[in-house]
Image (cartoon, rainbow, N blue to C red):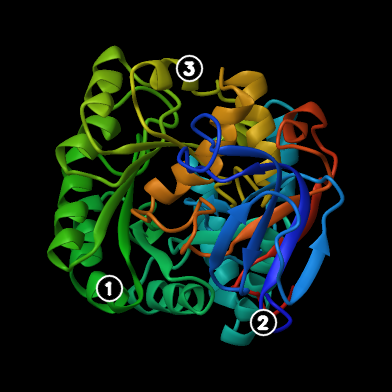
Amino acid sequence: MSPGGTVVFDNIGVLVTNDPALGDGPLGIVRGASIVTDGYTVLSVGRPGQVADTRIDVDGRGVVPGFVDSHSHLVFAGDRSEEFAARMAGASYHAGGIRDTVAATAAATDDELRRIVTARRGEAWRAGITTIEIKSGYGLSPTAEARALRLGRELTAETTFLGAHVVPAEFAGRADDYVALVCGEMLDAAAPHSRFVDVFCEVGAFDADQSREVLRAGVAAGLLPKIHANQLGEGPGVAVAVEMGCVSADHCTHVSAADVDALSSSDTVATLLPAADFSTRQPYPDARRLLDAGVTVALATNCNPGSSNTTSMSFCIALAVRDMGMTADEALWAATAGGAAALRRTDVGRLTVGGPADLVVLDAPSHLHLVYRPGVPLIHSVHSSYLPRSA
């Protein structure tokens, strides 16, 4: 945030604006630049030497828009590191571990859970994530889901009701009864704290008809639809996403030619979650195939306790370039403007005059180093009107 008055970030090496009108290519790159803000809004983008009340010399470092993480599950308690270690030793991934986190989260008080989630949000902020989506899904009861969303809403406006994450043990063999609860009492409790509704459409979770029912109910309650689709194998998730007009289909690890065609002719964003595929030893999504077909692609961390316990968007960018066929420019766009598209936001994920002054100064001359130097902490500083309490 601004210490008061206007601030100029001067002597920038490579500035990424994501506004082609301001610079070169789709990223709107300006080489040798300065940017003036009032701590909340971008006031001007220009050559070095612009004047403001305060000058910050970034000494040739690169500047990019704040990352937009459009898929996370931050509201959880407990530890599943032993499960992860077993998976790395050869055990297969399955959705059942979600129930372990449900139990640990239920055992945490509001204050304990608030402290945990706030610290996690602070970690993400220090990693350059200035806008984040937070899902519920580790409550699976009306009261617990509403609590998770209420705590998430304290940290972001981008909250998602994911009561249809997995069928609880007490509803074993009665998935339709649980869907009725999700679409009724649970949705009533969750909707006031939510912007989106989501469902895990996957073998072991919810089938296509059940997923449609959840999404229809959420839309009727005024929520925007999202879906977990095609993570563990080819299935109906992407088709349901396009049919239901979902804002995004998330995972898209296994997609058919028909899925790609459907996405390319729709407004549904394919949100890819490479850290989850890294942690579950799944194949990586073929981002090149999606991009070449004209699909809008986002990258997100999928921060969660079982399959992607990371808040590092830099790590996801490096994986996307190394293993998913994306260029460094495409991966950065997907982690910023692409994430914004997956939240139906047109203000964040870019640095344009009149837009939010959410920017990240890299400890490198350009965004290319996020891929060139994987694993190195290259987030020099984060500047945003949002400042988490634990930062």
> Of residues 303 and 186, which is closer to you in this image?
303
Which residue is denoted by mark 2 in the rendering? 5
Q: Which residue is mark 1?
A: 191
Pick the residue in front: 73 or 300: 300
Residue found 44% across the figure and 79% down from its top: 150
Q: Nearer the viewer, mark 2 or mark 3?
A: 2
Q: Secondary structure at mark 1?
A: helix
Residue under numbered circle 3: 288
Estimate the spatial distance between the alpha carbons at disc 3 and disc 1, rounded to whole Å. 36 Å
Pointer 2: residues within 10 angstroms few (<14), some, or many (20+)? few
Going from N to C along the chain, the mark reached first, 1 or 2, is: 2
- Looking at the rendered structure, the secondary structure element under dot 2 is loop
| Residue 286 seen in the current view | no
Q: Earlier in the sequence, mark 2 or mark 3?
A: 2
Circle 3 crowding by C-alpha within 10 Å: few under 14, some 14–19, many from 20:
some
Q: Quadrant of the N terminus?
A: bottom right
The answer to whether marks 1 and 2 mark residues whose Cβ atoms lie closer than 8 Å is no
Residue 252 in percent (x, y) is at: 41, 30
Q: CA distance from mark 1 to mark 2?
A: 39 Å
Q: What amino acid type should be assigned to the residue bearing mark 3?
A: Arg
